[in-house]
Image (cartoon, helix red, strand yellow):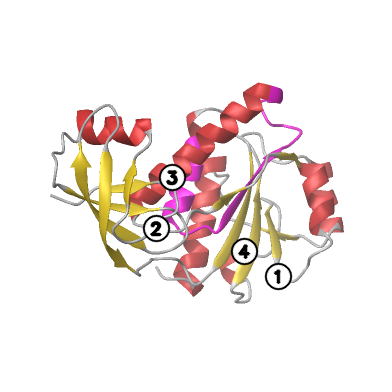
Amino acid sequence: MRIPRIYTDSPLSLQQELPLSPQASRHIAAVLRLQVEDEINLFNGQGGQYSAKISRIGKTVKVKTVRFENQGCESPLQIHLAQAISKGDRMDYTLQKSVELGVSSIQPLFSRRSVVKLKGSRLEKRQQHWQEVIISACEQCGRNRLPELKQALNLEQWVQHCQASQSHPHLILDPIANEKLSQCAQHQQQTLLVGPEGGLSKEEIQLAQLHQFKGISMGPRILRTETAALVALTILQARWGDL
């Protein structure tokens, strides 16, 4: 059986005994039904992982680290995904799969055609939910570093902020652009802007281009927002990354 991978936000060191979070404890005890002395792998998003053995099973599961493994599967590309917030499972799917495809950071954006409207406590809860989706994806795919989830912003505010740092290409998916993503020059760092279900408005695309974003086409067919992001990431990783 594959050794379970569990994320913890605690500092980790060798021969350390520590309690797991309530959620991780329930997963180990009730779902996986592991026992004392069974092995798990722990990581805290800082790189590498620790082999650990379960020392106590109860409402809170305790484990003891026994070995450090300085391994990782991070992409050689730094891809920063700016994703207009989509509805429900679509956003979760995009986050989950983008993590699996090696994205470095994720910037949720509110755009003019975004169906989802969030603020205050609802936005805080959704940000926490998105963070949990990212953690779960890292546990599943073997990544030991968590992609950074940035605080959701309005698209116009974010685009204007991006103008201050043009150290790498900033791309925007635009169905009427002439150049295809597969024709772009190689860069080890990319920022990729993807619109919501209804696409970005003409004004938003023009604003992005005014701030040096380059319009890129994904071909003759109109892709759903979750499809467009993942196809773009796959193209970048296949051409210059580790796919």
Disc sitting over residue 135 in the figure: 3
Q: CA distance from mark 3 to mark 4?
A: 32 Å
Q: CA distance from mark 2 to mark 3?
A: 9 Å
Determine which residue is flagged by label 1. 168
Residue 189 in which image quadrant: bottom right
Q: Is residue 91 visible?
A: no
Residue bounds of the magenta highlight:
91-120
Say left or right for 3 vs 112: left
Q: Is residue 62 visible?
A: yes
Task: Report the mark closest to the observer, 3 or 4.
Answer: 3
Determine which residue is flagged by label 2. 143
**Amino acid type shown at disc 2:** Arg
> What residue is drawn where x is 47% and y is 71%?
241
**Amino acid type shown at disc 3:** Ile
Q: Is residue 122 above or below residue 96?
A: above
Q: Along the line of sight, which residue is nearer the eye, 162 or 207?
A: 162
Q: Are marks 3 and 1 in contact (CB under 8 Å)?
A: no
Residue 35 in which image quadrant: top left
Question: Which secondary structure lies at badge 4?
Answer: loop
Choose the circle earlier in sequence order: 2 or 1.
2
Q: Are marks 4 and 2 in contact (CB under 8 Å)?
A: no
- Indicate yes or no whether the magenta region holds residue 230: no
Task: Report the mark closest to the observer, 4 or 2.
Answer: 2
